[in-house]
Amino acid sequence: MTFCRRCWNVAERTGEASDDSECELCRDPRRDPSLVCVVEEPRDVVAIEKTHEYRGLYHVLQGAINPIEGIGPDQLRIKELFARLGAEPIAEVIVCTNPNLEGEATAMYLARQLQPLGLTVTRLASGLPVGGDLEYADELTLGRALEGRRNMETGAS
Ligand SMILES: [Zn+2]
């Protein structure tokens, strides 16, 4: 196993050099490249895929902002996300971090950075168990939260 060089999801190493860099989802031409769903871990990608409600691409941060453990934006795959914004036709970023303190802090950080760039930044609708992990939400609840996603308010003037 290796990581996808585009979305940082886990990717299977096929042995063919040309296929090594991107995961199956990134290579699928049926996915909508204008939508990017930002998640904390590869297992969140699995959870969202199970809902069958999402047809865009992903970006895996490989963690969340956690000041107590010394994890800031620089420890996450955030600069890789910004690099993609310049190279891909991304119009909407759906922040699907976990509904807990670290996930919320990460979502706020991303919204503050992304909205000035003219991107639509949305967050999953409420209804997910607060303090829980995205991966533990059932498919129906997660699917509804995706469908009912809302623009994030950062309070920035
Ligand atoms: Zn990928």
Image (cartoon, grey):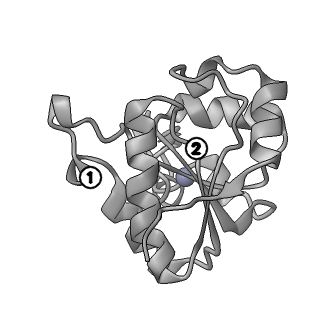
Residue at image position (14%, 36%) is 70
Residue 3 vs residue 118: left or right? Answer: left
Q: Residue at x 57, y 76 (%)?
A: 119
Considering only vertical position in the picture, is 6 above or below 82?
Answer: above
Work out whether mark 2 precedes mark 1 in sequence or the reverse, and give the earlier one.
Answer: 1
Q: Where's the N terminus, which quadrant?
A: top left
Q: Residues within 10 Å of mark 2 (few under 14, many from 20)?
A: many
The quadrant in which residue 27 appears is bottom right
Q: Position of residue 85 (x, y in %)?
A: 49, 75
**Residue 102 vertical placement versus 19 (above, below):** above
- The x, y position of residue 47, in whole percent, is 67, 29
Provide the secondary structure element on which disc 2 rests.
loop
Q: Which residue is mark 2?
A: 96
For the residue carrying disc 1, how many other residues have a C-alpha within 10 Å: few (<14), some (14-19), or many (20+)? some
Q: Residue at x 80, y 47 (%)?
A: 148
Tell me: is circle 1 under 8 Å from ligand 1. no
Q: Is residue 36 above or below residue 90?
A: above
Residue 96: image x %, image y %? Answer: 58, 43
Helix, strand or loop at disc 1?
A: helix
- Residue 137 falls in which quadrant of the image? top right
Q: Nearer the viewer, residue 100 or 76?
A: 100
Q: CA distance from mark 2 to mark 1?
A: 16 Å
Position in image of residue 77 (x %, y %): 34, 52
**Which residue is denoted by mark 1 in the rendering?**
73
